[in-house]
Amino acid sequence: MKAVILAAGQGRRLSGEGVFFPKVLAKVAGRELLYRHLKLLRERGVEEFIVVVNPWTKGPIKDALLRWGFPFRLVINERPELGNGYSLLQARDYVDGAFFVVMGDHVYEEAFLDEAIRGQGLIVDRSGEFIDRDEATKVILRDGRVRDIGKDVPGEWYDTGFFILDREIFDHAEAVLKEKGKVEMSDVVKRAELRVTEVSGRLWLDVDTPQDLKRATRFIVRRSVKPTGDGLISRVINRRLSLLISERLVNRLSPNQASLLSTLVGLLASLFASISPPLGGVLYQVSSILDGTDGEIARSSMKESAFGGWMDSILDRVVDFSFLLSLGLFLGPGVSWPVVALAIFGSLMVSYTSERYRAATQRDLYEDIPLLLRIGGKRDERIFLVMLLCLLEMIEECLWALALWTNARLLAVLFLVWRKGRKGA
Amino acid sequence: MKAVILAAGQGRRLSGEGVFFPKVLAKVAGRELLYRHLKLLRERGVEEFIVVVNPWTKGPIKDALLRWGFPFRLVINERPELGNGYSLLQARDYVDGAFFVVMGDHVYEEAFLDEAIRGQGLIVDRSGEFIDRDEATKVILRDGRVRDIGKDVPGEWYDTGFFILDREIFDHAEAVLKEKGKVEMSDVVKRAELRVTEVSGRLWLDVDTPQDLKRATRFIVRRSVKPTGDGLISRVINRRLSLLISERLVNRLSPNQASLLSTLVGLLASLFASISPPLGGVLYQVSSILDGTDGEIARSSMKESAFGGWMDSILDRVVDFSFLLSLGLFLGPGVSWPVVALAIFGSLMVSYTSERYRAATQRDLYEDIPLLLRIGGKRDERIFLVMLLCLLEMIEECLWALALWTNARLLAVLFLVWRKGRKGA
């Protein structure tokens, strides 16, 4: 299938009068609006993109399209002032059968598109959860088709700007153009009495103002947290703070830079731990919060990479090791160093056991054995405990606690996986 | 496709006169001959097995088939003395189109079957590498077809006992039966002037005597070593010894029991290391050699499991940790414990980096970055060095060497993967 991206809007509210900055190149959570459409639709099987632009923004959009490498055809709407329906008309010669039409200045999350691409006609949403409902285009339905549509219409459905159409739509657009001298999509939709498909409660919104950009970024970053995988402290404390940080950093830092930042703070924490454990402990917890941002930034800006995840994981182990070593050094010659060694070993093995499990089975250890989440011992939980005990200056107790907790957990994992293997095999 | 397994032979040379032990239930490298056929052909798409047995061995074979759970039909050859061609005739009503015919008392490696199932007629082998060539059935060809076949025929090709046939073969078998009063496969093959397909140099052999069983086991165990993944010491020393051990243990120990044995020796080594490092070091190297056997036994006896691999890997880490901890304890109060901690951390990270890489990319770190093999530091290499330095009673040097080697390697891995990520992404 093909997709027509309507990107001929002039985006004045975003760029200011007289500046010809293409709205679809505005970045939401580190990625251009247009890139988001292309990437997500490409992953869902779209083979060619018909991008309709205006004469003044053609240049930068073409440059971007060439850089990204998606299969595209650029079509110029010489008279964008005739409405976005007129932009659609420019795509007439390049589509066949069923095709998607997408408003270039909207943002959709993956779950929205997964459902929408299986629909028909206009995709409508009942919740309007993420949009400015007053400004939004409302739809009134009759028998599953559009009866009326517009900003001031008392409809209970919202026009999401995503369509699955066929060539019949062009006849309606022509008719509206003849009648009114210009043609907006809403007029075409109304005239065609388009069928609708409901996709409710998923993230989508349109971007008109700088405030919209910020809101869209915030929503996208928040949706980037994976539903499982967080320990208790992460869910209750770290994640909330790291999301606030990621929202602000996502347009400025790459995921790897965020990884590095968290690592540097962690190494700094280790340095301080050998002199002042309370200070070191607090910095360690700060680095633990920052440790959430690389993944959030990577996912929300579509910059995830296996290498990035690998690097982050190795650096976390280095930080954990150096912090515990420093705590041992702080205790001086009287240290029970085998306890430090046990704490280091046990902490590493929490991660080793689950990563080795994924390597062997391509499955998640915590999903297969949920009991482990209750035993705890994940990094966020360990670091929080370390911070607390460092603040209380209970350094020996801290090392003992870690050594016992993580190694008891290791025995539990061995037993639980062995039992599961016996049952499953 | 279906496969006919000829399993009505009486196996007198294997079991002794008067004992009705079904030859196809004899174990080669921990698995029954029949199981090997079913498992390997099932993996290659065979949907049903027609197993032809004699009246005296029907019972135990049926029990085994029910236990294994492959889709089968049991056919009884009431007069096995009429030859294996007569067995084939019993399968007449149960096959259609093309089908495989397999001599139940043969052993084939996977690579043989991968090629053989794409062939036609009789599969022949030019090398005869693994068989007793004097005893083997030779084939003379003309225009890609069998002209003559038999033990005493001066042919340059060997009959592998694996056939891809169609129903025409039954007419030839009937004709031979009428003419001679009995019917061997070789007579049928000759009469049909069967086409042949060459599959040379792959492991296959027939099992007639207890010596054949041992030879087959030895070959299968040797073929179980994965071509990559071994460190230098493993290739030069450990693997040779572990294969000798596995050959002897594969019919007696499960892979998990072999894992456990290696772990117990490793823990014993750790125990001794804190008293007598030379003794500990030697035992550590013994456990390192034994550590190869679980994988060899698992692969050669078709008992590989993700859980087994996981368990072995975790236990290896436990042994490495406890050995290094013990070496540190041996040094008493004067120990530079941070060096011990670094050696423990670095050793663990050798494995962590590559397992985490597999978890993230489903690829092998050493295949992607072969330079790492030259840097060394794999378990077999580390343990061998530890043994040498323990024998020389250079314990501090040993810990320093490990700490430096493994952590320098960690830095190298970080750099090399980072560089690869930049290029690749």
Image (spheres, coloured by chain):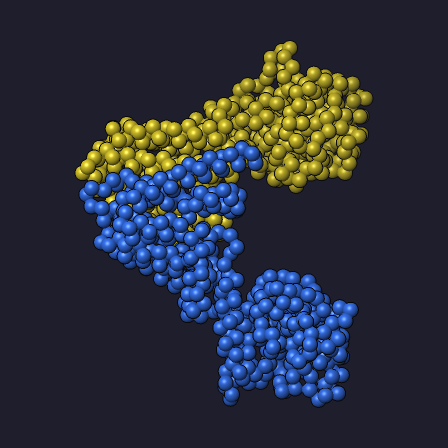
Chain colours: A blue, B yellow
Q: Residue at x 58, y 74 (%)?
A: A132
Q: Residue at x 50, y 28 (%)?
A: B254
Would residue B354 be visible to someone looking at this image?
Answer: no
Would residue A406 be visible to someone looking at this image?
Answer: yes
Pick the quarter of the image with the C terminus of chain A.
Answer: top right
Q: Is B186 in front, or is A5?
A: A5
Q: Percent from the top left, x then y, of residue A410? A: 41, 39
Q: Is A181 in front, or is B353?
A: A181
* Relative height, residue B123 to residue B53 (above, below): below
Q: Quadrant of residue A178?
A: bottom right
Does B232 sit left or right of B31 as displayed?
left
Q: Percent from the top left, x then y, of residue B219? A: 51, 29
Q: Quadrant of residue B242?
A: top left
Q: Quadrant of residue A174?
A: bottom right
Q: Residue furthest top?
A: B18
Does A30 sit left or right of A206 as displayed?
left
Q: Residue at x 80, y 25 (%)?
A: B175
Does A252 sit left or right of B12 as displayed?
left
Q: Residue at x 19, y 43 (%)?
A: A333
Q: Percent from the top left, x then y, of residue A223? A: 52, 62
Does B78 sit left or right of B251 as displayed?
right
Q: Is B288 in front, or is A383?
A: A383
Q: Is A111 in front, or is A255?
A: A111
Pick the quarter of the image with the N terminus of chain A.
Answer: bottom right
* Relative height, residue B201 to residue A47 (above, below): above
Q: How many marks?
A: 0
* Relative height, residue A377 to residue A223 (above, below): above
